[in-house]
Image (cartoon, rainbow, N blue to C red):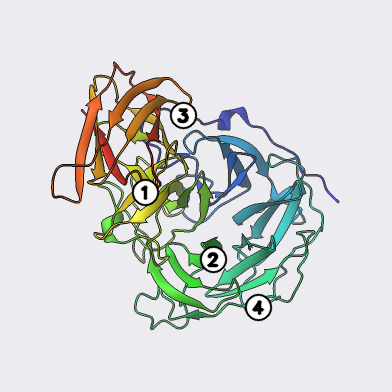
Amino acid sequence: MKKLIFLFIPLLIFQTPGFTKNPIIPNKGANDPHIRIFNGKAYLSASHDKSIDSKSFSMDDWWLWSSDNLVDWKPESVLKPDDTYIGKPFSSCWATDIAERNGKYYWYFSEGNEQSGVVVSDSPAGPWKDPLGKPLLASGLTPTHEYDMGIAEDASDNFYIVFGVWDYYIAKLNKDMISLAEKPRRIEIKNPRGPYNPDGKNLEKPTDDKPFIHSYKGKFYLSWGCFYAMADNIYGPYNYTGSIIDASSFAPGYEKPTWPAGFLQGRHGSFFEWHNQWYFTYCDISQTGNRYFRDTFISYVHFKENGEMTSIRVDGIGVGEYDANQKIEAEDYFNASGITQKETKNGGFVVGDIENDDYLVFPNVKNLSGKSSVGFKIAKNCSGTIEIHKDSPSGELLASCPIAGAKTNTVFDTVGCKLPQMIDKQCLCLVFKGKGKRLCQLDSFSFK
């Protein structure tokens, strides 16, 4: 059994300054991202495109990065194929995922488009060891190819591995997380679509590679890039639902260039929840112009009342940062306590079900210097007060804004209050005060 070496490379430390945070790790080639939350920190496991000059897919290792805020990222570990069962340099280190069970961490990796292995550590930062000395998913195990795996968990703390291309297979993992508890089962998807199958007629390539499963309010979501299907059972059958990227998703400068099959192709990624907020992390080449040197983006994800996901925003602002020169949508918070996101009749979202002492946190709000007031777009039946605190609910009180019901006939109205002199960058916490179980619905807020 080989021990894997933990590699710390100072030149790779990359905590990017400035405002633009998509891509999250620019000019490094981090792609096929999976983000998991362990011990209050986000961990990104990713493939690694070798060079901006690459003319084909060339990936020599796998990366693990961490972040406290989804904005600043630092490297934690590099996994070399030499130190796995592969046993030698290898330039097809494809998609990867990581999971935790009973204090141990399991990092799954693809051997090109053929097989998958796993390494184990007592820490999400390593060091890692290969417990099997052979693939976990060996080539020929199923009619598909055994690569591009994702790890899923159900409400009973069972873990599953899903993998393949065009047809996907799923198997429950044993509690040791390094062996299968059952023979892999084919997942049925009804009426699938994909980047090569926009009209449902391409039966040879109906979906894509890189499957992933997450759950939300009792439903399971099987995704392949930006396409997804829904089911009541993790094994399926799944009903194709749609794509979370469409032509309206793109901010200027982020719509091109696209892959040969268009902007829906190559969006490999994963969904994750943190602090009562959902996100999609995915591949993008709009800033590199090279399909063989991909970046990782993160966007907010919001769920409709029927469980479907709305189209995401593909832009340079990303998540976890806010611009005081622009309207800030309330549902795009970084942290929240006690609230819910609610779909409006026009397809937008507000935060609602607000009670006394519920709060929202918006870190890294920039361009606040010179702003003297804030306006809240609220429902007309609001009552109580919004307190603006520095950093947290117990932080310094900056302002107190009454939000008594609007006097107009519109569904939403804007109420505001004065601000003290603000520094340019600040973490703001909105704390709601009042009596009752539904004090307010907050749509957005703006600074002047």
Comes first in the chain, label 2 or label 4 = 4
Up-down relation of residue 45 to residue 158 (above or below): above
Question: In this rendering, would 211 be left or right of 300?
Answer: right
Q: Residue at x 62, y 72 (%)?
A: 145
Q: Position of residue 234 (x, y in %)?
A: 59, 71
Residue displayed at 68% across by 71% down: 171
* Callout 4 crowding tier (Cα within 10 Å): few <14, some 14–19, many ≥20: some
Separation (CA) of disc 4 from disc 1: 41 Å
Mark 2 touching mark 4, by CB under 8 A?
no
Number of the label disc, if any, that sits on residue 393: 3
Residue at image mark 4: 185
Residue type, label 3: Pro
Q: CA distance from mark 1 to mark 3?
A: 18 Å
Q: Which amino acid lies under the numbered mark 4 shown in the image of this protein?
A: Arg
Question: As drawn, which residue projects farthest toward the left?
Answer: 408
Within-10-Å neighbours for mark 2: few <14, some 14–19, many 20+: few
The residue carrying mark 2 is 218
Residue drawn at point x = 47 percent, y = 73 percent? 207
